[in-house]
Image (cartoon, rainbow, N blue to C red):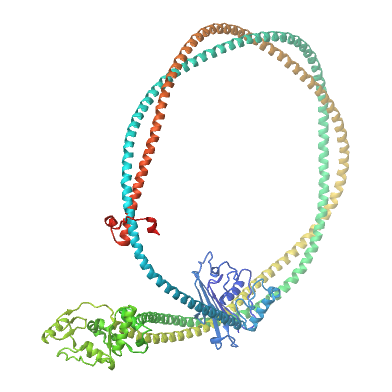
Amino acid sequence: MRIKRLSIMGFKSFKDKVDIPFPAGISAVVGPNGCGKSNIADAIRWAMGEQSARQLRGRNMEDVIFSGTGDFKPLGMAEVSIVFENGNGSLPGEFAGEEEVAVTRRLYRSGESEYMLNNVPCRLKDVQEIFMDTGLGNKSYSIISQGRIGSIVEQKPEETRLMIEEAAGITRFKKKEAEARRKLELTRENLNRVEDILSEVQTQMRSLKRQAGKAIRYKEIGAEIRRLELVLNANMYNELISASGENKKSSDILIEKEVTLSTTLSALQGRIESMNLELDEKDQVISGLNNTYLSLKEEFAKKESALESMAKEKEMQAGLEERHNREIEDIRKRLVALGEEKALLQEKITRLREGTRTSQEEISVIEGRIKGRKELLTEIKEEYEVTRTRVNTGVSKEAGLTKELDYLNKRILEITDRKTRIESEKNELDANIQTLVETSARKGELREALSQKLNEIGKDILESEEQATELESIRKSAENELKTAENEYNTVKTRLSGMKSLNENYEGYQVGVRTIMKANDLAAKNEGRVLGLVADIIKVDSKYEQAVEAVLSDRLQYILVENQEDGKEAVRYLKDKARGRGSFISVSDINGNGNGHGHNEHPLLKDLVSVPEKYKPVVNMLMGDIALAENLDQAVDAWRSNGRNTTLVTPDGDLIDRHGIISGGKLGAHGLLAKKREITELEEKVTLLIKKVSEAKDRLDNILFQEEELKVVLSRLREEKYKCQDQLNELDKVIFQLSNKLDQFERLSERLAKELEERIHEEAKHTEAIDRNKNEQIQCGEKKQREEEYLLQKKRELDECEREFDEIREELEGAKMKFRVSVEEGKGLVREIERIDNYHEEAQHRLDKITEDIKECQAKQRSFAEKEDILRENISRYYEKLRDAREIMDNAQQERNLFHAEMRENEKRLEGLREELDILKEKISITRMEQSKIDVRMETLVEQAREKANLNLAEIFMDYLDENYNEQTVRE
């Protein structure tokens, strides 16, 4: 047994359907990383029943469905089908004789899963049992996932034993043994539960007997309890009436006290409110006096503050005058010192000017000398640079000629070597071009033959696909036909099952009839003396069903028994069970009378009814003289013309009896006879539908077989086409590669020929250049020697001139430095004299300003003294006003405090009255609550009496009053 073919669609990375054949021998799946090799192993494991998403490298089972990419939408289903070749017949059971077995698993995104064996739905258990003793399975040794190879070596002894048992093929028997043991254990548990239930039922029976005795006792005690409850409630009701009267009297007294107290409280509250108003007026007067006092006090403080400020300002002006006097004295001393310093500076400036004139004359002489030397130095430098440039140029040119000669000799050697190699390469390349031309011609002939063969295969595939499309259309039609037939069969079968179930349970029958027909403890029923119902023995055409049901009506539910004793037994049974009533017909006691004489124009209804011979007397008795008319008008005419002693009925169920009473209308849609006829028709229809479903299945199987054959042919043709196409593609690639290589070789050959010609021309050119460079090199050497001797002479002259120029330049720099020092020193002395003059001018201005400030300070001191005297007089007057305002305010405040104390006394009295009133209201509320409780209890007692004894306690309580009533005794 081996895998022959694997079909994958919608599983992980396989969006479209992919068929992977596994030929005989060892097969390997090869491809780059991420191409889906591991997904093929996962697909095999999944199709064989793997239930763990983790084993399939996913988080949940939905992950195995193709989840879409940027260009493709997710699919809603994954399907994997494995075809096994059963060459040695190792599969168990019904598949032992099959050459191939296809195991298919589908998973929908909704979570629904399907398993199929050879396209027949099955269970996961069926799939597992097939592989159980074959050595295959999703957890067996035959599938080793990535990273699990070493686990065989590392596994425990128990795991090794399981692997060996799986390979030996005994797993299935061990599983069946375990399942049989589980069933035995379950049976033992069921037996134990049955014994427990029997024991429990017996216990419950004994308990029920005790409960029955208790129930009788309960009824007796219940009656006594109801009487005592009435006595208890009546006496309690009487006590509550008395308590209600006393409570109302107490409530009236408390309400009178409340009215009196409320009046007193209102008067006192009015007095307190008027005192509050008067107190507010006094507070406003005091507030006005206080504001006046505060404004005077504030003004007094301002005057005192102004007096202090003036004293401080006067003192400050005196200090300022003293500081100004000291500053005038300091400035005058400083001016005298600066005059002496200025005379000394002017003497120094005169001496510096004479030294500066001498330095300028010396600098002019030195500058004349340096100018002459500089011109001579420039002339010598120019001659030296020109000579050095000529020498450097000759050296560079000589070196360049030497390098160029070396390069040209090296280049001639390279060109000679390259010419040899080019000639060798060109000869080899020409031979390769000839070989490629011959090979390309052979491959072209082979491609033409393959192309012709591929066209023939394409035509065969097109014809087979057309046949497959036609067969698929026929198959879909057959599947629809089968589905329609199965749906109709299931519908009819369900309807028949429901109708039979209702008929067997006697649904729609009277309770008594149902009880007798289902009684298992009735002797007559068990011994077969209960023969059935009248409806069971009557068969009639559907067009006469309503007529028969109108005539017989409830008599269709009459029960047929052997004799009247059996009827009596059944009646007693119904009475004992209290399960309704029933009517019983004793078949043996009917004498067969009742044959009607019929009607001249209308047939008797009994002649239209089919009934077993044994029960004909029953039908004669029930429908002896009843005739059938076409409609109600004919029935009425026939009754009148027949002496008015015949019962007639119409097919619609309208009836006129011998007394002329007409009954009619619309009967129910399904009577007893109609239901029985429907059951018979449904049984016949089920038989026909079973045959129809079987024929549809056979036809579908035949079509599927043809489709499978055609698929095999198509698969073979497509496989052959793919092989031819692959060969053709390979040939195209080879021919294309040969053509490219031939082009490359030809272009290379042309390039080599051209390069060879260029190298010959370049060699001649370089030889000529070598001869020319050798002559130039000799001339350049002679000229260089002459120039170097002249350069050496000019170098000695230049060094002597530069030494003399440097000495004169140093002498000039010393003279200039001495001159600059004298100039800077003279500028510094001038700046000092300017500083002294500026200070003298500023000091004079400052003296004038200080003099004016002193006069201003003296004037301010006189003004502050005058204002200080005026403020002292004002402060004395404000102090007297402030003292008077304080005395008035203190008197008003004392009067207000006395009035407020009186008001507080009244408020305390009001608070006491309020507390007394609250206590009184609380007592009234308690009294009213007690009265409410009494009313509720009285209503409760009345309601209890009405519910338990259906009596009005308010009207009859006097009848149950007891002079010796004791509540404790009654309750006990």
Numbered-mark total = 0
Which image quadrant for residue 964? bottom left
Q: Position of residue 580 (x, y in %)?
A: 30, 78
Which image quadrant for residue 156? bottom right
In terms of depth relative to the viewer, which is nearer, 451 or 707?
A: 707
Residue found 75% across the figure and 11% down from its top: 342
Tell me: 543 left or right of 113: left
Question: Which of the image's four quarters has the C terminus?
Answer: bottom left
Q: Position of residue 674 (x, y in %)?
A: 29, 82
Tell me: 203 left or right of 394: left
Question: Which of the image's four quarters has the N terminus?
Answer: bottom right
In terms of depth relative to the viewer, which is nearer, 524 or 290?
A: 524
Residue 448 visible, this angle: no
Tell me: 444 left or right of 785: left
Q: Is residue 935 above or below residue 525?
A: above
Q: Is residue 785 above or below residue 573?
A: above
In terms of depth relative to the viewer, which is nearer, 448 or 105?
A: 105
Residue found 55% across the figure and 81% down from its top: 184
In terms of depth relative to the viewer, which is nearer, 324 or 348?
A: 324
Tell me: 191 left or right of 964: right
Q: Position of residue 589 (x, y in %)?
A: 26, 91
Residue 768 visible, this angle: yes
